[in-house]
Image (spheres, rainbow, N blue to C red):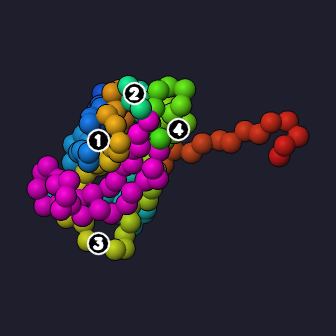
Amino acid sequence: MAILDERLELADASTAVAAAASTVNVGDVIDSSVARDVGNGQPIYLVVSVDTEIITGGSAGTLQFQLVSDGVTTPSTTTQTIHAISEEYVTDGTDANDAELKAGQFPFVIALPVEGQQYERYIGLQAIIGTTTITAGAVSAYLTLTPPTTRKTYADAVN
């Protein structure tokens, strides 16, 4: 487990992603004028982990996460600078959900892009909720030098 600095945390386990179909800010922002030289020459990773399974109450929908920056403390959902975006996951009831949206999973782990659009002052996380309302779910999101690793296991005689 990584040691977290409050200035490098975007969302903690109580940060809900329940919202109607739209693009929404998730958690807080990191003020890059305060948190400087975070990686000091090393790759910095954004990690989004699911603490409470993300589900919808009715029909299936979709969910993506995106790393953004903006010049204001509440990033715009239309004029923000988008630096990275996760794959699109299916949200539904517990049984039909994509596995990455279950508690304990990491749907978005990425090294912060160092090329491309320049970062604006405030770095944040947004959820793109498509089709239907997400009724439950909570995530943690933070920057770290040591991303989580998952150990793959294989059935006997399949490796």
Q: Is residue 39 left or right of residue 78?
A: right
First in sequence: mark 1 vs mark 2 = 1
User: Could you tell me which secondary element the residue under label 2 belongs to?
Assistant: loop
Q: Which mark is residue 58?
A: 2
The amino acid pointed to by label 2 is: Gly
Q: Nearer the viewer, mark 4 or mark 1?
A: 1
Q: Name the residue that disc number 4 marks.
A: 98
Choose between 135 and 100: the one closer to the eye: 135
Estimate the spatial distance between the alpha carbons at disc 3 and disc 1, rounded to whole Å.
27 Å
* Residue 79 lies in quadrant: bottom left
User: Which residues are the magenta region?
Assistant: 60-89
Labels 4 and 1 touching (C-beta < 8 A):
no
Choose between 156 and 114: the one closer to the eye: 156
Estimate the spatial distance between the alpha carbons at disc 4 and disc 3, rounded to whole Å.
31 Å
Estimate the spatial distance between the alpha carbons at disc 1 and disc 2, rounded to whole Å.
13 Å
The amino acid pointed to by label 1 is: Ala
Q: Name the residue that disc number 3 marks.
A: 117
Residue 132 in percent (x, y) is at 34, 37
